[in-house]
Amino acid sequence: MRSPTSSNAVPSTREIVSVQPFTGGDAEWNEWIRQAQGSTFCHLAEWREIMRDVLGHEPVYTIATNADGSRAGALPMVFVRSRLFGRYLLSMPFLNYGGPLGTPAAQRQLVEHAVGEARSRKVGLLELRSRIRIPSDLPVSERKVTVTLPLPATTQELWSTTFRAKLRSQVRRPIKAGMTARFGADQVEPFYEVFTSNMRDLGTPVLPRMWFERIATALSDHVEFCTVWLDDQPVAAGCGFVWNEEFEITWASSLREHNRSAPNMLLYSAFMERMIERGVKVFNFGRCTPGGGTHRFKLQWGGVDEPLPWAQWSPAGVAATPSPESPIFRAATAAWQRLPLRVANRLGPLLARGLP
């Protein structure tokens, strides 16, 4: 993990006396999160309001405290309830991380509390998504990995050392085709235009536009939007987050009709150059399924796999949240891919609100 180390002394197990709901404000939560070892952008308090206001989910944020009242740990969770997809308690939905933070003893108590919440809410699956194995006896799913790549100090080194000759050729292809990359909050709309088309082609309901609009405002210090343009048309786009000298590209899309020009190669290289300018040390390609096409695309940049050990509890042996990759959803995915884009864009956000 590339995150700051807390300077506080580690309290003994006897000092940790309680786990309780967090009822304070964003500033109070984030003050502790920013210094907590292992924290990620997924732990920030702003997701509480985004999940609730945009998707209608119930945030379940909890803290562990010491005998003297000081904070020993924290765990953000979201309760997702859907007639179509069932009940889930996740940390965090649509994101890759968010598991318990704090001392080992605090994390254990937070996990025990999470299992209790899952039982009381009769969920099909509790999933705590973490970058590292948490101190818990819960089963661990490693169905997803991420790929991370150290970034050099300069863009010159990026092109001369990090990018091999074949990769440099692939990145230059969209540039020769006249494509350019643009960054900024004004790229949210073109990003969403590309994103909706790509999600329809993948057979997956798209998140609401408001999801990204709220991210752009609430998390403006951390989020980056980029769009690759060909003349006046957006052809590829991405959205990601900076946290503790690491950048993760969380959502990325490109239009299939422009695949030959490889606009996604320009998208990723532009993000890398942007992050070097911001002093970021590590480029995180985001989660993917091992062995799939997306995984192979990410590995070609020279990064290495990082398993994602997500802890789970399920009363019925549910092993994963609903996914278009699952055999049971393949027929629905194929049907969705045939929908006119305007229909998919109208129905998608309604269904995506219920997806965990």
Image (tube, rainbow, N blue to C red):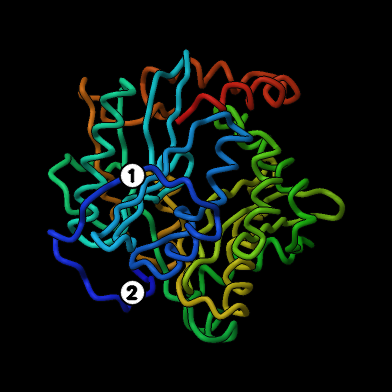
Residue 170 visible from this viewpoint: no
Q: Quadrant of the C terminus?
A: top left
Residue 330 horizontal side relative to residue 17, left or right = right
Disc 1 residue type? Gln
Q: Residue at x 59, y 23 (%)?
A: 337
- Camera-near label (2 vs 1) is 1
Assign the N terminus to one quadrant of the image. bottom left
User: Marks 2 and 1, how far apart in space?
Assistant: 22 Å
Q: Position of residue 210 (x, y in %)?
A: 70, 38
- Residue linked to disc 1: 20
The residue pinned by badge 2 equals 6
Q: Could you tell me which residue is drawn at 55 percent across and 32 percent down? A: 202
Tag 2 secondary structure: loop
Tell me which amino acid carries mark 2: Ser
**332 left or right, relative to 192:** left
User: Residue 260, relative to residue 158: is it above or below?
Assistant: above
